[in-house]
Amino acid sequence: MQDLLAKYGKVAPLLSQEQDAFTGLSTRKRSFDAGTNLVCGELDDPDQLYIVEKGRLFASTELANGERAITRLYFAGDIVGTANIPFEHATQTITVNASAELYIFPRKNLIDTFTNMPRVAAIFYTFAAMENAILNDRLVSIGRTRGKARLASLILEIEARRNLLLDPARERIDLGLTQAEIGDAIGLTEVQVSRLFRQFIEDGIVERRHGQTKILDRGRLSKIGQFTDRYDDLDLDWFEDA
């Protein structure tokens, strides 16, 4: 739970009772292997939510042509499944893509927490809105930019997510996705993703070694990706008097 408290504490310092409210959402923790589907689109009841203690997950939607679109990425400290909260059936498949430890709780547990602690509800809403903004940025990128811009933007998005909890000075990034999964996230084929990585490497923009990525020329990568760091763009003034 410490990663969740650290992440949410970046919006506003959490009071002790607010920390207790977050940690009290769940008392059950389970481990899941990579490749496990927690919910499978409309097949599953979306009642369960998950807090990521360790590992990586993503949300995806199967398209009519049999392809897959990865829509959200989940890291340690994230609450998974919030997009499914209002619906009778899950709208997305949630997949574990790196072995994970997850706290599990029913969505109804949010009701008392939000009723008794409006600041917790506001912090929760802030991160949900930010996730939607990131998804919107990626959709615009897919619809309006070339492949190089899409890949550049995704690399920077993952780095920004990592830097919420880890030391930004750590140079190498574990993208946590295969090249096929990266393609599913930005609307490209695995072959196209591989070719773009080679171009970035040849141009001295990134370095790839042992499955990890190092950004060598952040200015060029940011310019190519037309990237906005939504985590750095937060306006938190409205929390000051809360």
Image (cartoon, helix red, strand yellow):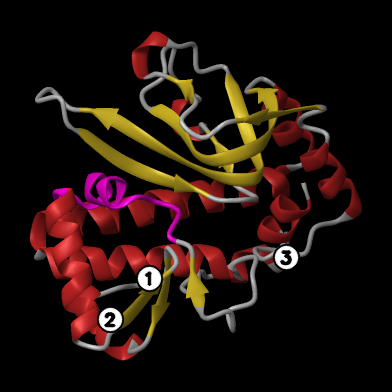
Q: Is residue 204 left or right of residue 95?
A: left
- Image location of residue 32, percent across then percent down: 61, 29
Who is closer to the viewer here, 149 or 79?
149
Residue 124, compared with residue 85, is above or below; it is below
Residue 102, compared with residue 237, is above or below; it is above
- Image location of residue 55, percent across then percent down: 59, 46
- Which of the two labelled residues, at mark 2 and mark 3, occupies the earlier sequence position? 2
Residue 239, compared with residue 187, is above or below; it is below
- Residues at marks 2 and 3 touching, judged by CB atoms closer than 8 Å: no
Residue 217, compared with residue 238, is above or below; it is below
* Residue 241 marker: 3
Q: Residues within 10 Å of mark 3 (few under 14, many from 20)?
A: few
Q: CA distance from mark 3 to mark 1?
A: 33 Å
Residue tagged 2 = 221
Q: Residues within 10 Å of mark 1 (few under 14, many from 20)?
A: many
**Type of the residue with mark 3:** Asp
Name which quarter of the figure residue 227 lies in: bottom left
- Residues at marks 1 and 2 touching, judged by CB atoms closer than 8 Å: yes
Residue tagged 1 = 156
Q: Secondary structure at mark 2?
A: helix
